[in-house]
Image (cartoon, grey):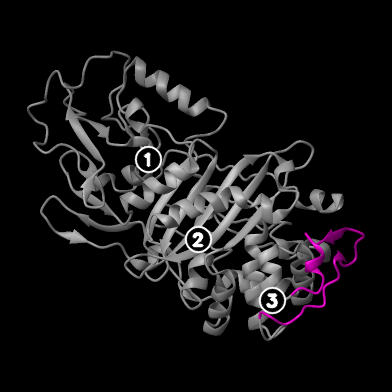
Amino acid sequence: MHTTTREALRVSGVLVALAAVTSGCSQDTPTGTDDKSPTEHASPSASKRGLGDILVGGKAVTGSQPTNLPKAPYQRTYTDGPLYASITGYRSMAYGRTGLEALYDDTLSAGASGDVATTVEPALQKAAFDALGDRQGAAVALDANSGKVLALVSTPSYDPALFSGRGTKDAQAWKSATTDSRSPMLNRALKQADAPGATFSVVVAAAALDQGLYTAVDDATVSPLTYVLPLSTTRVTGTSSQCENASIRLALRRSCANVFTKMAAELGQDRLRAAAQKFGFDDDSLKVPLPVAESSYPGDGTTAPEAALTGMGAGDVRATPLEMARVAAAVANGGQLVSPQLVEGVTKADGTTQRPEAADSGPAGQAMSRGTAEALQAVLGSSGQTGWVPGGDGDLATSWFIGSARSSDGRRIAVAVRVEGLPSTAGADEAVGGRAAAEAAERILASVS
């Protein structure tokens, strides 16, 4: 890719620190530095059941054990804490609560002792977690029809059990987690919005087909191999000679930046922004019900060359892995944008069950026509769409993948994977650079087939 294009693609990650949902300890939360075992004494006034639990696959991934503290009668325990930390968050006697622990505190706290059942499937969660390993990244898997979140992984992770108490060891573990340069407590799947690279070309292709710019995915585009951005001297060159006048089908498979920057310029910023919004961009109210960082398409004031760069997922386009999983789900689901939902239901102490309101998980609707979705699904097939966002001046690069596969029980599962911290030299060919995320996605989708 031409040097000037690398500079144009250079973006800085939008690292939104995962702040505690609560303001820290409540007045009933004890502080101190002793390391007495929390099982030494049980408060006679404590609830017999203890804290409520968060369920995955119908089984509790949290627990509780009694303390000798009347105002904090139970301390939280976790099963496979790092595996589910991006979902549960943490509940600490010293450092407050985040994640579902905070959002459903009125259900999970001692005395209330209800349960929160998630939509997450243990096998998919484990496959995604193992596929990413200790690399910086995120993975989201959605049921493309219902919008249920089947996996939600952010790596590297942390173990919330290590600082659920209030002693010296808890303080040491907290300091280690919060000062780690790799930000293990940042929920990258929901809270980090970055340039999506060529995965955004799926949105551009959908807009071009729906707007009648092209009538079919196999129509040749009038795209020179090296495209000069409008009102600019910046040049964008395709990854191979096949990218010259490539069809949408070939351009997606080869991640032809020349085709999609020109296509974005032809659509114009207003039409492309409207198309992106149909996919869920520019929605700052999305919740699953955990709040999600806004995925955005640039607004007014964007220059013509900057707008053209959005065609290849550069410029000022930003997307979370959750948002790109919604894009993949829309392609797999006849163009319908799903409302993602992480919580199946909440069971109160009296046994009554409440289901979360769909309105909390963002608007749904037709992101593109059914015909366009079916055409793009045929193009992407099992290979999906990769993306590569190179760094500049020694910065590390990012690999993306979105796609879907049919599960053994007939469901269509959509996934998005982002792997960060890769050497920029690894992706001289954008299609090759996307392999890091694609290989992780293959392992995830293999677990459902």
Which of pointers 3 and 2 lies earlier in the amino acid sequence? Answer: 3
Residue designated by label 1? 83
Which label sits in the foreground, 3 or 1?
A: 1
Is 29 placed above or below 335 here?
Answer: above
Query: Which of the image's four quarters has the C terminus?
Result: bottom left
Relative horizontal placement of residue 73, taking residue 307 as reference (left or right): left
- Mark 1 residue crowding within 10 angstroms, few (<14) / some (14–19) / many (20+): many
Taking the spot 59% from the left edge, 73% from the top edge, the residue there is 379
Give, as a three-letter code, the residue at label 1.
Leu
Please give the range of residues in magenta: 217-246
Whether 116 is among the magenta residues is: no
Whole-percent x and y of residue 369?
55, 82
Residue drawn at x 32%, y 42% is 101
Query: Residue at point 92% right, 60% down?
Result: 233
Main SS of the magenta segment?
loop
Q: Determine which residue is flagged by label 2.
A: 325
Q: CA distance from mark 3 to mark 1?
A: 41 Å
Query: Real-space Cα distance between discs 1 and 2?
Result: 20 Å
- Residue 66's tag is none
Tags 3 and 2 in contact by the CB under 8 Å rule? no
Q: Which mark is residue 271?
A: 3
Q: Amino acid at mark 2?
A: Ala
Q: Nearer the viewer, residue 414 or 20?
A: 414
What SS does tag 1 mark?
Answer: helix
Evaluate whether residue 133 shows in this view.
yes
Residues at marks 3 and 2, CA–CA distance in whole angstroms? 22 Å
Amino acid under disc 3: Arg
Quarter residue 162 falls in: top left
Numbered disc 3: secondary structure: helix
